Amino acid sequence: MTKPGTPAASARSQENRRQLIAEHVVEHGTLTVAWLAEATGVSVMTVHRDLDALARRGVLRRFRGGVSALPTSVFESNLEYRAGVRVAEKEAIAQAAAELVEPGMSVMLDDSTSALALAGLLVGRTPLTVLTNARRVLDVFAGCEEIRLIALGGEYSPTHDSFLGVACVEAVEAMSVDLVVVSTSAMNAAMTFHQEQDVVLVKRAMLASGARTALLMDHSKMPRTALHRLCPVTDFDHVVVDAGVDAALLAELREQSGVDVRVAEAPR
């Protein structure tokens, strides 16, 4: 457990506050610095620093005396934003998902931050063949002698820090793996969604290439929808969620025929 007052605890508290600020701005559209300072219980100067950091990540837009939200499709796709939210939940989900991986398997990981969290846990489950379109996942495994690492290339996306497009889809379609692990931006009890067509096409190709498939989702993504349908929940063999999922929704997920639903408990 991280003790209050330690650098790690302070960093987590800062990220939690910045996540809360982002959520307030998205909900209201436009807010003043004074309003955010009162809502978060910190000084105006602290809010200014938080807003500067969020603006650098591409989450929101600053203007004199306030801040406004960028379009949902922009900030939800931004890797820096995604990497800083629901960290404990993603770590717990990754721990549970790691149980699906055994030495000797071939595993395909998408460019989600949930898959990135899982990647760090797989170094000790070698030998493995790992395929991914995510640059940061490539960095995790680069230099690991017992990892056969295959990069799924395509057109580089700075927003996602990954490779997408027709070339990536074609590279994925040429593969057949034991397990595909993905996440996405939204789901309900029946369907999964993503706001970007290019990302949907790559994820669909990935899912079609796996003997088994796993979906990693934290509770903030459900029940929600986005512009494009990815695939039905029943297309997945495993769904791994955190303990914050609404009980009624969890029950609906568990009623889905053939889907193994696992609930990951966050460390205390």
Image (cartoon, grey):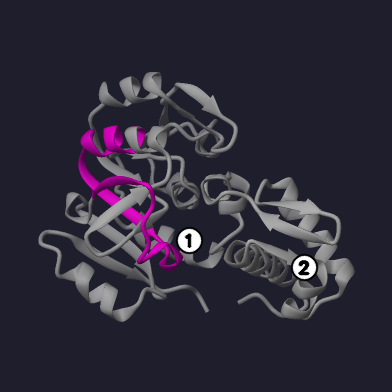
Q: Residues within 10 Å of mark 1 (few under 14, many from 20)?
A: many
- Rendered position, 226 above or below 16: above
Q: Position of residue 123 (x, y in %)?
A: 46, 45
Q: 183 or 196, which is in the foreground?
A: 196
Q: Which residues are magenta?
A: 202-231
Residue 205 position by quadrant: top left
Residue 68 position by quadrant: bottom right
Q: Looking at the image, do the residues carrying marks 2 and 1 touch, with CB atoms under 8 Å apart?
A: no
State left or right for residue 64 relative to residue 202.
right
State left or right for residue 165 relative to residue 46.
left
Q: Residues within 10 Å of mark 2 (few under 14, many from 20)?
A: few
Residue at horizontal 39%, vertical 18%?
167
Q: 111 or 196, which is in the foreground?
A: 196
* Residue position for label 1: 90
Residue at horizontal 41%, vertical 74%?
265
- Rendered position, 218 above or below 75: below
Q: Position of residue 257 (x, y in %)?
A: 10, 62
Residue at horizontal 22%, vertical 60%?
190
Q: Give the quarter of the figure containing the N terminus.
A: bottom right
- Mark 2 is on which residue type? Pro
Task: Label 1, secondary structure: give it.
Answer: helix
* Residue position for label 2: 7
- Rendered position, 215 above or below 92: above
Residue 47 position by quadrant: bottom right
Magenta stretch contains residue 259? no
Task: Label 2, secondary structure: give it.
Answer: helix
Q: 131 or 126, which is in the foreground?
A: 131
- Tell how many labels: 2
Q: Which mark is residue 223?
A: none
Q: Position of residue 14 (x, y in %)?
A: 73, 67
Question: Alpha carbon of mark 2 to alpha carbon of mark 1: how far?
Answer: 21 Å
- Mark 1 is on which residue type? Lys
